[in-house]
Amino acid sequence: MQQYTLKKSLGQHFLKDDTICRKIIAALQQTTFSQLVEVGPGAGAITKYLLQLPDIQFKAVEIDAEKAAYLQTTYPNIKGKIIQEDFLKISAPFEGSFTVIGNFPYNISSQILFKILEWKEQVPIIIGMFQKEVAQRVAAAPGNKVYGILSVLIQAYYSVEYLFDVPPGAFNPPPKVMSGVIKLTRKEEVLPVKSEKAFTTLVKAAFNQRRKTLRNATRALFDEATLQQDIFNKRAEQLSIHDFAQLTFSMK
């Protein structure tokens, strides 16, 4: 008997396919961690497995009071482990290092990734379910038409592995799109940049006008002499993450 309602406004599509849940758990178990945060547990399809993992500290972030109540009734051992707040507004749920997992609400999945980026020093692994198009964007390489701000800012700090597709039928209600699960692993060595702020500013400026040459899209950020370099004849999607990182040192 289902004791909760689905809320469109929260982008809720709940996993119901146990095979997919077990594949996600299997990917998680190939990594080592002692602290784990689940984003948007919903009706607990993945949560019920996470609660069985031995010797870990677990927290679930769920903004919806009705789901939080449902989870506590259905899985009594989750008591005290739910943070009933907006994930985009919380501070880091643990001290020290923690892994993040979740079937991320599709309407804010990019924002969730940018939020986790703020904690990158603490988060070595992220395993997330996204709309397939977003998952592909995160994983895209230079030259690909979906390579963009999300690809560059995430891949500057994490290696991205596209794990598998998830069909609409695995969810209730079925979304209108395919989904995909990706795994992000923090890089041991980060590319040197002038500053993270400069890097972000440059990447956003370059892709916000992606049809223009880099020279026209980022003119305000460099002096005229620098803008004469050949690289500025290219468009944003032709530049590697390394190219962007290098260019920050020439910014005004």
Image (cartoon, helix red, strand yellow):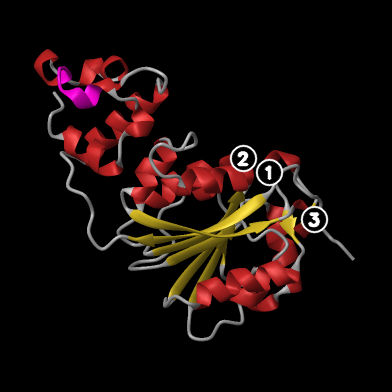
Residue of label 2: 107
- Tell me the magenta residue range: 227-232
41 to 139, vertically: above or below: below
Q: Is residue 64 left or right of residue 241?
A: right
- Number of the label disc, if any, that sits on residue 169: 3
| Residue name at image x 76 percent, y 72 percent | 74
- Number of the label disc, if any, that sits on residue 11: 1
Picture coordinates of residue 173 (x, y %)? 80, 50
Q: Quadrant of residue 199?
A: top left
Magenta portion: prevailing SS class: helix
85 to 203, vertically: above or below: below
Q: For the residue labelled by badge 2, is the local secondary structure a helix, a strand or a loop?
A: helix
Q: For the residue labelled by badge 1, is the local secondary structure a helix, a strand or a loop?
A: loop
Mark toward the start of the polypeptide (3 vs 1): 1
Cα separation, mark 2 vs mark 3, equals: 19 Å
Label 3 environment density (alpha carbons within 10 Å; few <14, some 14–19, many ≥20): some
| Residue name at image x 15 percent, y 17 percent | 228
